[in-house]
Image: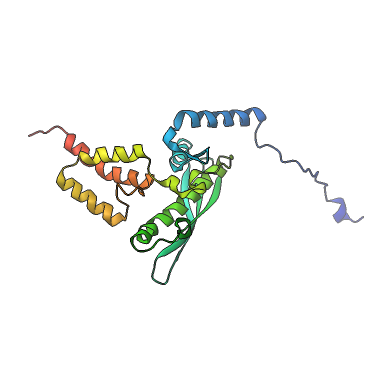
Amino acid sequence: MDDFDLDIEDTPATALVVPVAPTADIVGAMDAYQDLQRRLLSPNDWQTIQGKQFPKRAAWRKLAVAHGISFEIIDRDIHTTDDGDIVFAEFVVRATAPNGRSVDGWGAASVAEKGSPSGKALGKLMHDIPATAETRAKNRACADLFGLGEVSAEEVDARAMLATDDELADLGTNLAGLDETQKQVVKRKWTDAGFASLTSGRLHSEQVGTILGWVQPMIEVNQAPFTD
């Protein structure tokens, strides 16, 4: 045996995957996460599909905020027809925790999920498809980052992205608090954004949040006390 062989130290091999922290710490972290879910999430954050509950986009965003998670779009691929109509989209989104750990999530959506729409319906889907794909990618990244691998409602059924009756009612109440000039401003923004109408049944929860972001500052102005 030559000197080279004598300098090599045997490294013990194991087939076991060793936990990154003591068992008590891991169990404690999991208990804390589940307790956070129970206390932070509301019934509207869950979607019942075929008798089973799945966390919706709102649930993952609340948990992401609570854990200080940031998102970054790593890649996107949007497929269109020769006429420019979007028929398929896929996103890769990276979720990063404050400790630097990150996970990439992939999500896709296709016009085929909606059957064979045409005309105006297809035009609305051009906005829905990328949004659905991005949401699925973010949800998957969160689920993997938290180490639970839960399936989100949007992965099972794209309709889970639709605003709930409570969300729509809240939006309607806020819109009613605007004057006519303010309503016209919101209407123009709404149209430019390509969002579905309030009564269409196709408005997304995320879109409701965006509209409320336009409306609520206007209401605050209306409610502010008048001073000379």
| Residue at left offset 33%, top offset 44% | 208
Quarter containing the C terminus: top left
Q: Residue at x 62, y 32 (%)?
A: 26
User: Between residues 82 and 34, which one lies in front from this camera angle?
Assistant: 82
Colour setting:
rainbow
- Outermost left residue: 228
Q: Position of residue 11 (x, y in %)?
A: 80, 46
Residue 182 against residue 3 in the figure, above or below: above
Would you identify the image quadrant in which residue 121 lies?
A: bottom left
Q: Nearer the viewer, residue 149 or 119?
A: 119
Residue 59 point in image, percent of width and height: 46, 38
> Where 139 sits versus 34, above or below?
below
Q: Residue furthest bottom?
A: 82
Question: For the view shown, which residue lies furthest in the right direction?
Answer: 1
Number of numbered discs visible in the structure rendering = 0
217 horizontally vs 82: left or right: left
Q: Classify the position of the N terminus by image quarter.
A: bottom right
Residue 193's x, y, as percent?
31, 55
Residue at 46% from the left image edge and 49% from the top image edge:
158
Residue 94 screen position, x and y as percent: 51, 50
Query: Foreground residue, 174 or 39?
Result: 174
Q: Residue at x 10, y 33 (%)?
A: 227
Taking depth in this image into account, of 118 and 3 the one nearest to the observer is 118
